[in-house]
Amino acid sequence: MKTEQNPLAPIVLFAYNRPSQTAKTLAALTENVLADKSILYIYCDGPKKTANIEELSNIQSVIHIANNAVGFKKVIVKQQLENKGLANSIINGVTEICNEYGFAIILEDDIVTSPFFLQYMNDALQLYKNVDAVACISGYCYPIKEQLQPTFFLKTQSCWGWATWVRAWAEFEHDGTKLLLQLKKKKLEKKFNLEGSIKYTQMLKDQITGKNNSWAIRWDAGNFINDKLCLYPNVSLVQNIGFDGSGVHSAETNYYKVHLSDHPIIVSSIPLKEAYTARNSLIRFYKKNKKSIFIQFIYGIICKLKLDKFYKSL
């Protein structure tokens, strides 16, 4: 493992077939205060066997963008010849970099960052590096209205611009079935689902049955079961631009849109416990989100019925 005095964490970016989003992610990242002092690893996933000409072209464009990335201390591109899929790419890549450096800052190809993202991440990684209760750092903050402390802890994770240490990542549980059994045994399902405001347990069940291949729900469940904390900023340092319908694992929506922080987030020691104000705010956010989706769904059905009636009248 590489060791230096107060080293900056390596940045690990996972990309696939979205050249436009990848370019935006890299452009924002180069504007970060510590970008020119940071090592960037770019993992480019390979094509699926069923990839068409357009997909192959997009993959090649992403590789070209990665190979021409500038503005960092060093850029190392890891190109895969075959498609590993997002879950395997992230699990293997984060493991490789954490084992080599002891920690990592992780991004996907649809995450635009504030110029103060890297500073916050590195400050938090240094402050909590030996605190076993803290498993990860989030750069995202949900668009909630309540006034929150500059940084706070939750027992739920966000994988939109995050960081971790080898000590925490070593506890990643690959087997979703084991995690589900532990949640049931400890009677944690309701709490894990944020009092029923979001279906995290169902996501885990879907991973087990192969309906999804999420690494994030397993990471989240494992940390929750082990009573681990995730640090959040009170103003988001990342914006997910993948909800434009282009992503493999995300639909089109504006519910998670935020205003990026235009100032540094000060990281200082805070009590090692979940911020209940933030937790309750997140629960209200998800409940409101769920209600909005339901209303949008009903509105869509009404519009379709009216349209069908109109066509039948012609």
Image (cartoon, rainbow, N blue to C red):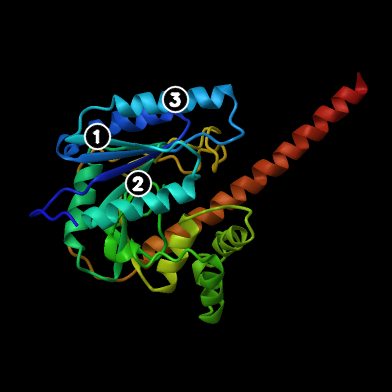
Pointer 1 or 3: first along the chain: 3
Quadrant placement of the N terminus:
bottom left
Measured from the top left, where is residue 93 in percent x and y?
Answer: 36, 49
Q: Amino acid at mark 1?
A: Val
Q: Secondary structure at mark 1?
A: strand
Cβ atoms at labels 2 and 1 below 8 Å apart: no
Quadrant placement of the C terminus:
top right
Asked whether 148 or 195 is in front, the reply is: 195
Measured from the top left, where is residue 261 in percent x and y?
Answer: 28, 41
Foreground disc of the pair 2, 1: 1
Q: Which mark is residue 60?
A: 3
Q: Amino acid at mark 2?
A: Gly
Viewed as shown, does residue 121 lie left or right of 199?
left
Q: Can the viewer see residue 147 in this picture?
A: no
Pointer 2 or 1: first along the chain: 1
Residue lying at 19% horizontally and 50% vertically, measured from the top left: 122
Q: Which residue is at the far front?
A: 81
- The residue wearing badge 1 is 75
Q: Amino acid at mark 3?
A: Gln
Asked whether 16 or 30 is in front, the reply is: 16
**Label 3 crowding class (10 Å Cα cut-off): few <14, some 14-19, many 20+?**
some
- The residue wearing badge 2 is 161
